[in-house]
Amino acid sequence: MNNKTATEVDTFLEQHPDIQMLELLMPDINGILRCKRIHRREFDMLFDNKFKAPLSVPLLGMSGDLYDEGLDHSLLAGDPDQLLLPIPGTLARIPWLASPTAQVLTRFVDMQMQPSWPDPRNVLMRVLKRYREAGLRPVVATELEFYLLAPGTEGSPQPLKGNIPGTGRVQQGIQYCMADDLIDCDAFLDDVRTACDLQNVPLTAIHSEFASGQWEINTHHTEDPLEACDHGMLLKRIVKGVARKHGMGATFMAKPFADIAGNGLHIHASIYDADGNNIFACDAGGPPEHYSDTLRHAIGGLADTMDEAMAIFAPNANSYRRFKPGAFAPSSPTWGYNHREVALRVPVSSEHNRRVEHRVAGADANTYLVTAAVLAGMLHGISHQSDPGEPVPVDADLSEAEVTLPRRWDAALEYFRKGSILKDYLGATYCSTFAALRQGESDDYNGQVPDLDYEWYLRAL
């Protein structure tokens, strides 16, 4: 056992002597944390770097299947073991469980202790290596939206709407940032805060969003993008676990309800040089909408890569239901200052904090892969001095803007396969595997016969 992890686990067990089980959290291609639970007597095996798991675990589809048609089968021949290593700083108690159980986030390495290619965390590590080689340091934060679901036995989910005190009625309308919603959900929100504190997830703000039952939680920016993505993954788990404890559901589906807002994953990213200077900053004294050439180039790179990255930003069939005019989901690679309908927003900020808010991905996307694609696009743009075109004016109305981004799953996968920029950054092996597995899942999804087919066609035809 290395000294750092040995000290961490020993200290943790001294502080929590009742802990008997440990859940090993394994990020997969979907952004789902696959999980094994081990007994206390097996803890040393994990922290001695001797615990193994199949190579295929990070590549399972949404339903747990391995959609390997079209895959290079030599990559998974024999489904060999790989090692599972605990990530320092993520060992924590699970407060929403009745049993004395802890959790730890893990990463995959091969039997020679090298990063295992199917692990999405390692894909982001590849991109960050390019930044280190360029003498640059990205700083990242995440914003996640989700819905709380009303308890019930109905087959179709319903958003959890606020109560009108003194009546049996529920509150209608958007009610953005409504104080009464905080009161109604106080017990849930306080348990989320407690869990975030216990699990070292730096929660900064919570508020009700643009639809009844919808919420947004922000985490603090960090100089380690891997850690920022860890926070996003753990936050999803916290929300869903605490909601279950309170008899509710929670979902990060991109578009769980047809007629109200979808759920987004927004990535805030800035880049600093070796001296700690924000390379997006302009000379002091200019107007806030004055942009440095470097910032423009980074945005240009994000625009250049947006079509081929859509399969990452919108990884499921449901993801594409977000993208329609007037839905506060971007329709094309637009950019501008302080405008919430553009894809690439430059928020109000000081020059030291000058950053890009990437607003395309849905909350259903894999946080590691989204961040890898965003950072790859920015570095590509800076390296190639990409031109993003003219910014959208602050007061521009984009509610009827044409949707130019891929609007269907298969179309996005085709852009992804044909693209060349992300393959260079994320790795050709991972990209070809991602495309094959997602295409297999898309084919399976589209081969099903849903109830809507019966409702529309069965009687008429």
Image (tube, rainbow, N blue to C red):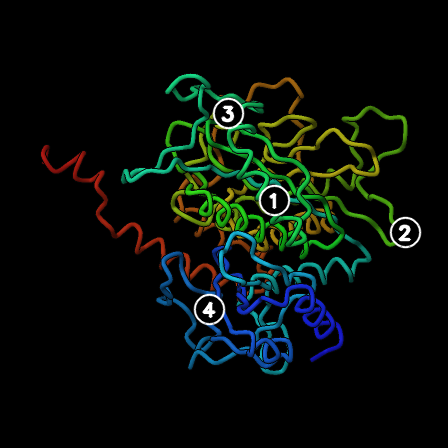
Amino acid identity at mark 2: Asp
Residue nearest the viewer, comparing 290 with 156 = 156
Answer whether labels 2 and 1 touch (C-beta < 8 Å). Answer: no
For marks 1 and 3, the one nearer the N-term is: 1
Q: Which residue is mark 3?
A: 401
Residue nearest the viewer, comparing 360 with 10 = 10
Q: Secondary structure at mark 2?
A: loop
Residue 160, given in percent of the width and then of the height, sits at: 42, 32
Residue 317, given in percent of the width and then of the height, sits at: 38, 46
Q: Which residue is mark 1?
A: 304
Q: Which residue is mark 4?
A: 57
For the residues labelled 3 and 4, the Cα–Cα distance comes to 41 Å
For marks 3 and 4, the one nearer the N-term is: 4
Q: Nearer the viewer, mark 2 or mark 1?
A: 2
The quarter of the picture where residue 350 lies is top right
The quarter of the picture where residue 344 lies is top right
The quarter of the picture where residue 107 lies is bottom right
For the residues labelled 1 and 4, the Cα–Cα distance comes to 32 Å
Amino acid identity at mark 3: Ala
Residue 275: give its label: 2
For the residues labelled 2 and 3, the Cα–Cα distance comes to 41 Å
Residue nearest the viewer, comparing 52 with 430 = 52
Q: Secondary structure at mark 4?
A: helix
